[in-house]
């Protein structure tokens, strides 16, 4: 999972059916059959019918997940089910009792012929729950259904390893983008079969008007599907950058090739209305679900997709190939978390940055700057909390509050391990080599014990690597990043980075009039280069930028759009001053902050550094 966080300050500023009587028995087949009806959506709700195999017990429980792999948060998907009913073969109702948010028991279970319920979606009510949008659901009749399967289909523990057959009735105008194979040739019905429930959970489907491209990279078929509610983007417009990125990833990974098809399902949120607000992506073995704002400029969208999709794609290494028993035998309602988030998320995030410098997508200095930013971000968190303890207890406070550090310190842990392995092997091996060896040792079907991983890594690397893991990953000692950078001839240096014209850290330099919804400039902002160059003064009302009108309703779009602005870009701003409209023209002047970064200074280690970044 990869979350994109824009500005907490901006968020704060905005203040603030009746079942059929014809029941088809499933007793002849040892599979769970599911019917999802996308043709009769009512109030953004979808009817789901579940037909289990023959049941031998008097009582059985049906569950929706509390948590799913990759999210590390308890989200209680059962809360979005309504009117759960059970029927026998004659259409008579059976007694259903709700046990908790995610579980229902059915009495006289031997007679159970089918279970029905309505599913509500999550995108348009995101203020009422904490589900990360790429793991959530959307139901808009005739437009889009983001069918993350764990939000629609549950399981009986007795049949969690039983095959599933899922039939989805849908309008002919909607097409389902997925890595699964549709076994029904009809235009209005899809049939998918999977070997067990966990395989179903790992295969999202996005229904919308067909907008997709496909291409092949080193034997892997890639599907890019896009839903853009206002038609701002198409799959074709996004594909060139995605193809460049994924080709580079495959070249970087080399031997890793765990799937023949990979789908990227991109949902672009309309932030001017109630829609998804949790931007980022969620990984699956053969797919990634992505949510991004539709208002984002193309260049910025391409950059964000490069970072978040590459992160999710690298999850094919870990935990999708290399993982512990806690992940192999994941319990959706009473999970035991693994100690090794430093590897699952940290190594993945490090690869998402390393491959870009390795393949020439970013410069060496840009890579150092990214790592420096991670050091700065990690410093705001608890640097003495053992990462293994945080990982195994990540669902509880205070550990859950440190989860974001898996993308910051987790990536830095991986970087330092990479450096240590390179130094020990005189540049011949790095952390990618380690992951390839671990993949050979374990692979998708063989899980390791949490307690054995460090021993195995030591056997494949060196005692120095084991010492690092014990001291800085399992222990409370902060990592001396300067020491590890110095091993590669890299030292501290001051660098300048461009900021955002509307924000200083988390503080905006504007406010909102709640009565008129107008955006006005705060006192003191006139001294900033952006406002000064245009002649904007305190209390001026910003009504339009580059021909687009802005107020409270689309302030988020203004912030997102400004992220892509570059120094000296032409700009036109319409303001109101004392009730009079004025049109101001000029160029963008970005704020710049001097921050501590890193640069290569030791020429004697150039060969070792080259092996680290380009090997």
Image (cartoon, grey):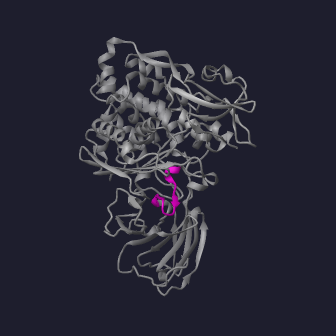
Q: Residue at x 45, y 83 (%)?
A: 23
Q: Residue furthest bottom?
A: 90
Looking at the figure, which quarter contains the C terminus? top left
Q: Report the magenta residues as a range.
A: 133-149
Q: Judge by depth and name the residue closer to the eye, 329 or 605.
A: 605
Image side of residue 305 versus residue 334, left or right: left
Percent from the top left, x then y, of residue 158? 44, 70
Residue 163 seen by the camera: no
Q: Position of residue 77 (x, y in %)?
A: 55, 60
- Horizontal and vertical percent position of residue 186: 33, 70
In x, y percent, where is residue 402? 57, 39
One can see residue 126 in this view: yes
Q: How many marks?
A: 0
Q: Residue at x 63, y 32 (%)?
A: 574
Q: Residue at x 55, y 37 (%)?
A: 560
* 471 vs 281: above or below: above
Residue 303 as seen in the image, left or right of residue 28: right
Residue 585 image-quadrant placement: top right
- In the foreground, 461 or 238: 238
Which is more toward the observer, 171 or 397?
171
**440 with respect to 571 (left or right):** left
């Amino acid at each position: 999972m990869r979350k994109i966080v824009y500005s907490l300050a901006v968020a704060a500023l905005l203040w603030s059916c009746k079942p059929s009587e014809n029941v088809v028995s499933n007793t002849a087949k040892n599979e769970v059959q599911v019917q999802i009806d996308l043709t009769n959506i009512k109030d953004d709700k979808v009817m789901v019918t579940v037909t289990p195999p023959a049941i031998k017990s008097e009582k059985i429980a049906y569950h929706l997940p509390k948590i799913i792999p990759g999210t590390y948060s308890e989200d209680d998907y059962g809360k979005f089910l309504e009117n759960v009913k059970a029927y026998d073969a004659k259409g008579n109702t059976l007694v259903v009792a709700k046990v908790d948010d995610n579980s229902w028991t059915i009495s006289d279970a031997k007679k159970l012929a089918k279970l029905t319920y309505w599913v509500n979606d999550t995108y348009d009510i995101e203020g009422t729950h904490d589900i990360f949008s790429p793991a959530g659901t959307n139901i808009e009749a005739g437009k889009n259904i983001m069918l993350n399967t764990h939000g629609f289909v549950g399981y009986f523990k007795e049949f969690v390893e039983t095959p599933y057959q899922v039939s989805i009735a849908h309008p002919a105008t909607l097409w389902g983008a997925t890595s699964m194979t549709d076994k029904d040739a009809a235009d209005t019905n899809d049939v998918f079969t999977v070997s067990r429930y966990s395989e179903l959970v790992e295969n999202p489907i996005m229904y919308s008007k067909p907008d997709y491209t496909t291409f092949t990279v080193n034997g892997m078929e890639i599907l890019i599907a896009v839903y853009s509610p206002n038609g701002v983007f198409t799959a074709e417009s996004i594909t060139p950058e995605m193809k460049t990125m994924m080709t580079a990833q495959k070249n970087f990974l080399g031997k890793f090739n765990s799937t023949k098809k990979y789908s990227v399902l991109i949902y672009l949120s309309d932030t001017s209305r109630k829609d998804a607000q949790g931007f980022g992506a969620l990984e699956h073995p053969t797919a990634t679900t992505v949510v991004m704002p539709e208002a984002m400029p193309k260049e910025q969208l391409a950059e964000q997709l490069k970072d978040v999709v590459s992160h999710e794609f690298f999850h094919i290494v870990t935990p999708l190939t290399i993982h512990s028993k806690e992940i192999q035998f994941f319990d959706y309602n009473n999970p035991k978390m693994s100690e090794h988030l430093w590897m699952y998320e940290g190594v993945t995030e490090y690869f998402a940055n390393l491959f870009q410098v390795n393949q020439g997508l970013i410069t060496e200095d840009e890579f150092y700057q990214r790592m420096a930013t991670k050091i700065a971000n990690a410093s705001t968190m608890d640097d003495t909390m053992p990462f293994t303890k945080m990982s195994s207890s990540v669902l509880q406070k205070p550990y859950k509050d440190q989860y974001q550090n898996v993308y910051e310190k987790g990536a830095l842990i991986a970087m330092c391990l990479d450096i240590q392995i390179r130094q020990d092997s005189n540049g011949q091996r790095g952390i990618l080599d380690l992951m390839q060896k671990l993949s050979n040792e374990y692979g998708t079907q063989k899980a390791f014990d949490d307690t054995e991983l460090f021993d195995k890594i030591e056997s494949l690397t060196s005692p120095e690597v084991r010492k690092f893991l014990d001291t800085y990953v399992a222990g409370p000692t902060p990592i001396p990043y300067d020491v590890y950078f110095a091993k590669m001839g890299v030292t501290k240096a001051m660098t300048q980075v461009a900021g955002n014209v509307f924000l200083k850290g988390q503080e905006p330099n504007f406010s909102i009039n709640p009565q008129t919804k107008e955006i006005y400039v705060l006192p003191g902002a006139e001294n900033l280069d952006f406002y000064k160059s245009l002649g904007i003064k305190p209390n001026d009302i910003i009504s339009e930028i580059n021909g687009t009108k802005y107020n409270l309703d689309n302030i988020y779009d203004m912030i997102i759009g400004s992220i892509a602005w570059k120094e000296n870009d032409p700009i036109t701003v319409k303001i109101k001053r004392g009730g009079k409209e004025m049109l101001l023209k000029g160029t963008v002047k970005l704020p710049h902050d001097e921050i501590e970064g890193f640069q290569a200074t030791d020429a004697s280690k150039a060969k070792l550094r080259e092996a680290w970044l380009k090997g």
